[in-house]
Amino acid sequence: MEPYVANPYAQPRAPQQPAPPHSRNPYHQPPRTQPPGVQPYAQPYPQPYAPPYPQAYPYGYYRTRDVFATAGFVLSLIGGIVLAPVFCILALTRVRTSGEKGRNLAVAGLVISGVWLLAGLLFAVVAALAPAGRDDSGQIVDGGTLNVHELRTGDCLAGLPESGTTSVDAVPCAGPHQVEVFYSFPLPDLPWPGEDAVIETARGECDGKVPDRLSGLDVMFLYPQRDAWEQGDREITCLASSEPAAGSQVTV
């Protein structure tokens, strides 16, 4: 066996370089290692997200309703126009300081009471101005207003007519009354004779015509003044009154 002979023409081999290190991410963190014999930490179980708290609202409070407001409103509905306004005004004063409910009820009660009051006044005015009603025989059966020239013998009045009046309050004689017409007559159609002459003629005629059933009552009469005389009024109306009169005559 021939000994190993080096090749004189072979190129010398370059020394072997260590392999370059592997390219690494400069931000890469190496995994942590636990010392021998130490158990690694267990990862905690993920906890479910708790539901959010409900939205908080400001606390409210219950306001009571004022009893006077309720009472005033109820009374106004049934026509209690005397007490209803009093209760409603008291309620408005109270709720202003107490903070209770009821202001709208109190105001409504006042309005309704006002409507009742206006309706009552309107009814009274219409009733006062309504003409008296007569039946087929001519007797007054429904009280009301009558013109003095429409008075008839046997008519009854609620009270003494005022001097210078042109209308009277006639009522049925079956009910309460203070005055009754017992006679009427016309004066002669002559020029104006003077007020004294008219009064004298009327007094003498009326005093002589008083019926026995009215003999204890005061006698008075309605007579025309000069203006009415010049317009053709000549009528004298004799009255018997249970109410004492300041005078015995009433002008019309």
Image (cartoon, grey):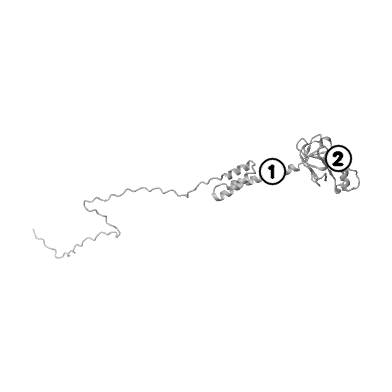
Crowd around label 1: few <14 · some 14–19 · many ≥20 (10 Å): few
Q: Which of marks 2 and 1 is nearer the N terminus?
A: 1
Residue most extreme to the right:
190
Q: Which quarter of the rendered picture does the N terminus lie within?
A: bottom left
Between 228 and 185, which is closer to the camera in this rendering?
185
Residue most extreme to the front:
216
Q: Mark 2 points at which residue?
A: 207
Choose top left, top right, bottom left or bottom right for residue 21: bottom left
Choose top left, top right, bottom left or bottom right for residue 75: top right
Crowd around label 2: few <14 · some 14–19 · many ≥20 (10 Å): some
Which of label 2 and label 1 is nearer to you?
2
Q: Residue 120 carries which label?
A: 1
Q: Where is residue 207 in the image (x, y as percent from the top left)?
A: 86, 40
Q: Position of residue 27 (x, y in %)?
A: 30, 59
Question: How many marks are shown on the rendered structure?
Answer: 2
Residue type (three-letter) at the residue carrying disc 2 = Asp
Q: Which mark is residue 21?
A: none
Residue most extreme to the left:
1
For the residue labelled by badge 2, is the local secondary structure a helix, a strand or a loop?
helix
Horizontal side of 72 relative to 195 (left or right) equals left
Between 221 and 234, which is closer to the camera in this rendering?
221
Residue type (three-letter) at the residue carrying disc 1 = Gly
Q: Position of residue 232 (x, y in %)?
A: 87, 45
Q: Distance between the residues labelled 2 and 1?
A: 43 Å
Choose top left, top right, bottom left or bottom right for residue 7: bottom left
The residue located at (59%, 43%) in the rendering is: 71
